[in-house]
Image (cartoon, rainbow, N blue to C red):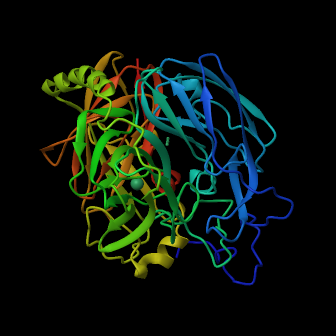
């Protein structure tokens, strides 16, 4: 292996090396449950990143990071068009920042270090001026060592409503989907100097919903319950099934509503950074089991139980207005299809020392094969570089920065090479703009919607139409935290 020593904290007796991130809970307050925070136009909201004790395994409190003491952080509920000030304070022992994933705001409040702002040092603060031009589901997380900070608990949902008064709506529940590598004491182990698990990303041994190993809630029979799903994992794609439901409709993806609610035939696939909004209609009795069901392994995440109280409160059909609004705005992206492809990005891997790993490329790696676990765990950006390459210029990662005209659409093709040293899926996220996925491998997207992150399976080619509506120089990157740490990021400019 390339030059680094034994993994800190792996010797089993509690002794850790100097590079190990502390797992001590001495003197820490316990995490609090996630709160809903309603932010009105002109609101000022204080947000603090801090260290808490939180039991990710439901039993053993371990050292975790929280926003306002909460894991996940508070759910921010705002009305479309609102302007909100967030006074952010960093009470962590590490520098951090807050990125408002998917929100088309001003670049200087986008949280990217160093593009948008200097890192917020421990005990320092930063004032974010946020705007919310689009209705939909978004989220916030740090943009520095996400592999560590986000995994330790720094993530929260943002729900932007298109109509303030709104009529009758289904009850909503936010489910932040995540996973963690927990040791026997329920602790996570990280290195301060670098992200490990750099090859495939840090796939957890424990699946989490809202920071816990399982989730459950009760509703009246027949109720339509709206689930706002966020994949906040470092690397894991989820394949979600809802067993026992009367019906399941896909309502929205990332920030955008579909033209109409669309029945989920099989499963909902979400990769890191992506969101999905799903309406589940409950049976008259019994329950609906939510599971991650992939590659022949079914792992239960939680359930919606039919409670004793009768009479479903909400509407029986999904409210139509958000879909009508979406149809109008999606038409412009549709028209862009006549244009030529502006840019093609290739996704690749450079590894100086061949590791002799098989590359029997599955389109999606649902988990780390056991045989590769130790190798994957030990690797850092010192051992490999994940690459995005602009095939037009040959530029890679940091050297990519093409300019697109403000007010135009640009079509991009993203090609995930199937003959790299380790082909696997990459969720590619563009900051500051929104796009529509046109097709994957030439097959038209059955559920177009405004998105900001797209899953590109190994060996696949995805075409997106990006609306260049927000001026500035923005980053785009793979949302597997360890791939981002291993180079997989470039820039583009809208001017
Ligand atoms: Cu959610 Cu640049 O990230
Ligand atoms: Cu990646």
* Foreground pick, 24 / 94: 24
Front in this rendered view, residue 301 or 450: 301
Say if residue 285 shows up in the picture: yes
On the image, which quarter does residue 319 sit in?
A: top left
Q: Which quadrant of the figure shows ligand 2?
A: bottom left
Q: Is residue 381 above or below residue 72?
A: below
Please give left or right for residue 235 compared with residue 112 in the image. Answer: left
> Where does residue 188 sit, x and y in percent of width and height?
64, 67
Where is residue 221 shown, x and y percent of the image? 38, 52
Q: Is residue 420 left or right of residue 46?
A: left
Q: In the rendered picture of this protein, how many numbered marks are placed on residues?
A: 0
Q: Is residue 34 above or below residue 76?
A: below
Q: Position of residue 132 (x, y in %)?
A: 50, 23
Vertical position of residue 197 compared to residue 279: above or below: below
x 75%, y 64%: residue: 22
Of 126 and 185, nearer the camera is 185
Q: Give the residue at x 69% y 49%.
A: 66
């Amino acid at each position: 292996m390339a030059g680094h020593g034994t993994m800190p904290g792996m010797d089993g007796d509690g002794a850790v090396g100097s590079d190990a991130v502390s797992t001590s809970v001495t003197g820490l307050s316990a995490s609090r449950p996630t709160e809903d925070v309603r932010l009105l136009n002109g609101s000022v909201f204080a947000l603090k990143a801090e260290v808490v004790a939180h039991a990710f395994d439901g039993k053993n409190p371990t050292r975790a990071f929280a926003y306002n003491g909460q894991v996940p952080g508070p759910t921010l509920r705002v009305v479309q068009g609102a302007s909100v000030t967030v006074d952010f304070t960093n009470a962590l022992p590490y520098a951090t920042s807050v990125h408002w994933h998917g929100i088309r705001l001003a670049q200087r409040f986008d949280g990217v270090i160093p593009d948008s702002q200097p890192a917020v040092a421990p005990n320092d603060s930063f004032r974010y001026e946020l705007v919310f031009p689009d209705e939909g589901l978004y989220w916030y997380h740090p943009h520095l060592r996400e592999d560590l900070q986000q995994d330790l608990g720094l993530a929260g949902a943002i729900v932007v409503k298109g109509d303030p008064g709104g009529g009758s709506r289904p009850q909503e529940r936010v489910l932040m989907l995540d996973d963690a590598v927990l040791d026997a004491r329920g602790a996570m182990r990280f290195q301060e100097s670098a992200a490990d698990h750099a090859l495939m990303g840090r796939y957890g041994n424990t699946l989490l919903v809202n920071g816990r190993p399982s989730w459950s809630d009760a509703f009246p029979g027949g109720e339509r319950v709206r689930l706002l799903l966020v994949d906040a994992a470092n690397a894991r794609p989820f394949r979600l099934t809802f067993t026992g439901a009367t019906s399941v409709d896909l309502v929205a993806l990332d920030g955008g509503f579909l033209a109409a609610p669309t029945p989920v035939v099989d499963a909902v696939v979400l990769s890191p950074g992506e969101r999905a909004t799903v309406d589940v209609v409950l049976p008259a009795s019994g329950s609906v089991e939510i599971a991650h069901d992939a590659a022949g392994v079914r792992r239960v995440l939680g359930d919606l139980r039919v409670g004793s109280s009768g009479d479903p409160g909400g509407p029986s059909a999904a409210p139509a207005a958000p879909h009508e609004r979406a149809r109008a705005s999606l038409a412009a992206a549709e028209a862009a299809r006549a244009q030529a492809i502006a840019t093609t990005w290739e996704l690749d891997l450079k590894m100086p020392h061949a590791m002799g790993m098989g590359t029997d490329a599955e389109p999606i790696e649902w988990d780390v094969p056991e045989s590769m676990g130790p190798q994957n765990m030990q690797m850092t950006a010192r051992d490999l570089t994940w690459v995005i390459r602009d095939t037009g210029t040959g530029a890679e990662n940091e050297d990519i920065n093409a300019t697109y005209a403000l007010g135009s659409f640009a079509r991009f093709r993203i090609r995930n090479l199937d003959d790299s040293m380790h082909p696997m899926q990459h969720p590619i996220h563009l900051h500051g703009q929104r796009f529509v996925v046109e097709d994957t491998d030439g097959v038209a997207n059955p559920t177009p919607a405004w998105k900001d992150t797209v899953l590109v399976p190994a060996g696949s080619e995805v075409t997106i139409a990006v609306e260049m509506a927000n001026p500035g120089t923005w980053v785009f990157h793979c949302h597997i935290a360890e791939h981002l740490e291993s180079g997989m990021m470039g820039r583009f400019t809208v001017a």
